[in-house]
Amino acid sequence: MRVLKIALTGGIACGKSQLGDFFAKFGADVIKLDDISKQVTMPKTKGLKALVAVFGAKILNQDNSLNRSELRNILLETQENRSIIEEILHPIILDKMQKMIEKVEKPLVIVEVPLLIEKKLDYLFDRAIIVTCSEKEQLKRLKKRKNINENTAKMLISAQVSQQQRLALSSIMPTDIVNNDSNMANLEIQAEKLYQTLKNQST
């Protein structure tokens, strides 16, 4: 059975994870690359050992788990740091993603890919879903997260491609746009409607 592979992407704090959770609620197989990233950087993993070899034990908590806030700060310091971290982790993450897709037994799978545009990963998918919101809303949501002040929030947003660049994906592949400037109830309604449409197209 051929599986329709759909990439779910969007700017940070636009609501990718919430939208993915709603798709899962309605019966979709959902793979989240952020979750895979956490799995491949658990204690004693190849990914974490490689990061420690480059950046040292300062990126570890006392229990030898990854201090994600510290790694994020290092990533934001320089473009070189970002490139090193991505070169270590991305091949491991994508390999695990492909293996998970191969095990899918439903007509479609939705994969949450935060850096779909930045890393030019569109070739791995048949179509895309982009979740959008205003930058004002992004800042508001980011500042509610642990260890993120306004300056860090702005740096995280500026480190990604613009919404305009992201929306240009629709000229390359079939793309659905979901706006998430409203509330969770509205997002859930959009998710259910879109999932039914995609499911019908995949069968």
Image (spheres, rainbow, N blue to C red):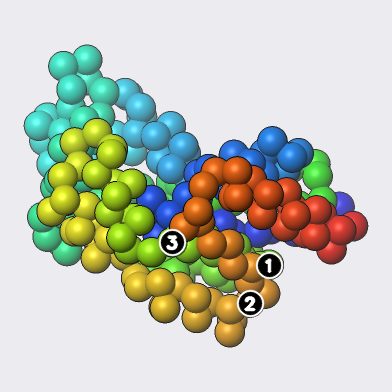
Q: Position of residue 66 (x, y in %)?
A: 25, 29
Instruction: Return the residue nearer the eye: 152 or 119.
Output: 152
Instruction: Name the quarter where the C terminus is drawn.
Output: bottom right
Query: SS of the residue at dot 1?
Result: loop
Q: Which mark is residue 126?
A: 1
Q: Is residue 36 left or right of residue 107?
A: left
Residue depicted at x 24% and y 44%: 143
- What's the residue type where badge 1 is placed? Asp
Left or right of residue 36, residue 159 in this image: left
Of labels 3 and 2, the one closer to you:
3
How many numbered marks are there? Answer: 3
> Label 2: which residue?
173
- Which residue has dot 3 on it? 133
Q: Amino acid at mark 3?
A: Cys
* SS at circle 3: loop
Front residue of this view, candidates 110 and 87:
110
Residue at position x 39%, y 34% from top?
38
Q: Earlier in the sequence, mark 1 or mark 3?
A: 1
Coordinates of residue 202 in the picture (x, y in percent) = 83, 59
Quadrant of the rendered structure where residue 126 is? bottom right
Q: Quadrant of residue 53?
A: top left
Q: How far apart are labels 3 and 2 at the CA level?
A: 21 Å
**Front position among marks 1 and 3:** 3
